[in-house]
Structure formats: C-alpha cells, structure tokens
Image (cartoon, rainbow, N blue to C red):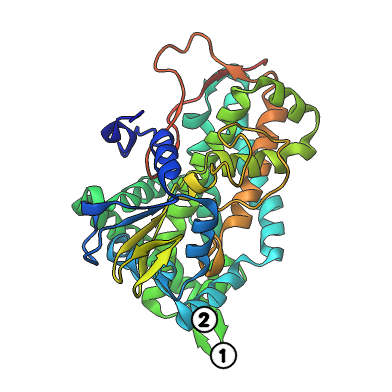
Amino acid sequence: MAYDRAAATDFFHGQPYAMWDEERQHAPVMNMDGMSLGQGDGGSYHVLGWSEAEHVLRDAETFSSSINMAHIGEFMGELIVGLDGDEHRKYRNLVAKAFRQSQLERWDDTLVRPIIAKLIDEVAPHGRGDLVRDITSKYPVQVICGIVGVPLEDAEQFADWAVKINTGTLDRETGFAAKKAMTDYLRPLVEERREHPTGDFLSDLVHAEVDGHGLEEERLWGFLRLLLPAGAETTYRVMGNALFALLTHPDVMVRVQADFSLLPAVVEETLRWESSVTMVSRVAMHDTEIAGCPVKAGSPVNVICSAANHDPARFDHADQFDIDRPPALHVAFGTGPHQCLGMHLARLELRAGLEEILSRLPNLRFDPDAGDPAPLIEGFAFRGPNRLPVIWDR
C-alpha cells in the first residue's frame, strides 16, 4: 500500500489522490465494509471511476440525495440537495429563476468586478502579500453577501458562520449556533423584501412562483443557509487552487497573462484537476449494482468526484494540470438533476477574479522569503491552499 490511510483522509490536511488511485486500479466501485454511515447493512461504497460516477449522479431514482438531509441538513435545514423527483424539480425551478442570465450579467459589472478590484487595490502598493488571506478568502463571500443584500462590512462574520455550518458535523454545538445566528441576521432582510421587493436576487427568491406556488418558508431558509457556505467557501478554495496551479506552472502563467482568452480553459482545467469539493453522497433506494459491484438497499454511496476527474480512462495524464487538454466534461459540479445551480456564478467569479489579479499584480510569483510551510493544496473532503505568499512588481 503506497499511502497512509489516516494521513490521506485527514479532514484538514489529507492528500487522498494516491489512495483513490490505488482503489480505482483495484475496482472503480469499492465496498468499504465497516465504514457504513448506518443506513444499510451492506457497508458504504466509494465510486471512483468517471463513467460509474456519471451513472450514479444521473440516476436519481436509484441513488437518492435524501442522505444529505441526515447530515448537513441538520445545520442548514430543508435543502434542495436532499430532495428528489418532482419535489426536487419544483424546488429547483423556483430557485433557478434567481440565477437567470440577466442577473449574472448585472452582477459581473456591478458587484463581482468592483469587489475584486477593491481587494486588489488594498494590497497592490505593498508588492507582497498572501493571496488566500488578502483576496481569495474575502472575495467570494463578499460577492455572495452582495447578491443577498448583506452589507459587505459584515462579510467576514458571514464567512465565519459559513465555515462553522459547513463543518457542523465536527462540532455540533458550534454548527447549530452559527445556523441560528445566520438566520436571525437574515430574517429582517427577508421580511423587508417580502413587503418591498426590489427586483434583486433575494426579492426573486422570496416571490418566485411555479404553478402558483412559492418557496415554502423552511426551504427558503434552507436555501439561504446552503447558498452562503456553498457559494463562499467552495469558490474561494477553488480560486486558490487555480492560483496555485498558475504559480507552480510559470510557463502557463506567462501565456495566460498575454492572452486572457485562455482563462476559461484555466478555470475548467482547475475544476477538473483540483476541485474544492471532492465528493457527494447518495443512498441506494433498492438493491442494485454499479459496474458489477452489488449494492444493497439503504447503503450510502459516496461519489468521489475528484477521483472520477482523475480517471485515466477518461483523461490522459490525468494528474497533470494541462490547459491544452482536449475539452471533456468533468463532474466538479456534479451532473444530472442535482448539478450545481451556482456553477455559472462560480465560473464568472473565477474568470473575473483571475483576470483582475493577473493584470493588476504584474510578475506574480511565490515569495522566496515566506518561510515554511510551503504552500500546498490539502484537505480530504474540501481542498485548497491555506496560504499563497507571493510577491509582484509594484
């Protein structure tokens, strides 16, 4: 065995790719025996191959998302990611209206670009800084807060609540406290939009209707509690991954700085190579099989999207960061009926953020005097660099 399982699966510092590669070479689907989450008696399963992952994610009738309600649902409430079938479609159609293309275009000019520009303005004169501390950890949460109508000066508080809700299973008391605090803060904003809609995202959400039915109260709160952690923490991590990739591939950095039309390729390759969220959970609704592996009803099925995105049967030299790779669908945002609703916003933030950083921090490179530890992408379920100390020409 070429890896230490305890180290590979460390929540904050894990490096799981060698483990996933070895498991996938053995079989694209693995019964993890005694690692069941308690829903069934057949153990839990890891889906590691790309075609097998796509199959599970597309077959929502056999592989239900309801398992998510048993975990993050405790801290976020009744969630769209925990529903299936007609109920899920109705809920998704209600929420999707708030992410319409005209909103995305408006956010680009009025929110996304001004926020990233202001963050860069604050550090550019210094000639050195930490891109995680100074920019990426602040940028997406400020965008989400601006979208929802939260004053940007409160974004740091929301970032803290987002982390505590996302990791609530590790510290239940703190997770529940963050859930309550976020709800108490947002309640007056929701009531204001209910009485006086302004045409913004929150107004769309509060007043959206499909077939004469609006968003039920608890599902509205569930979506807002999901949106803020998901939209803030995941995007900041993957943006750090993109910057790490460029800083460790200076030849690619030079090409991109000379031609920003390459940025969409940088974004898609980063999402495939090092997505911020490595896995999603499903539960088998009846006895079935995946690639010949029998799966008992009630068993948890963990789709390891990051392993699927490194499947050599799907991607040549899959462990390498290569923006010239022929286009091929990845599953960083999932696929099927539960594909991430915020994926277009995330791509917009990544493209805009990278363009502004690379154009306004010239000759960006790692700081040779930053000391240890060396920057790296780490984590088991959520991956990203904790620091990116850099210098640039002022």
Residue 375 image position (x, y, % from top left): 46, 22
Instruction: Tell me what residue is drawn at x 57 percent, y 66 percent.
Output: 201
Whether pointer 2 and pointer 1 mark residues with C-beta atoms closer than 8 Å, the reply is: yes
The residue wearing badge 2 is: 90
Name the secondary structure under disc 2: helix
Instruction: Tell me what residue is drawn at x 76 percent, y 37 percent.
Output: 262
Left or right: residue 391 versus residue 172 is right
Viewer-nearest of labels 2 and 1? 2
Residue 330 in view in this figure: yes
Asked which quadrant contains residue 318, the reply is top right
198 w.r.t. 343: above or below = below
Residue 346 image position (x, y, % from top left): 59, 51
313 vs 378, nearest the viewer: 313
The residue wearing badge 1 is: 211
Residue 95 image position (x, y, % from top left): 54, 72
Instruction: Tell me what residue is drawn at x 57 percent, y 25 percent.
Output: 123
Residue 195 in view in this figure: no
The residue type indicated by label 1 comes to: Asp
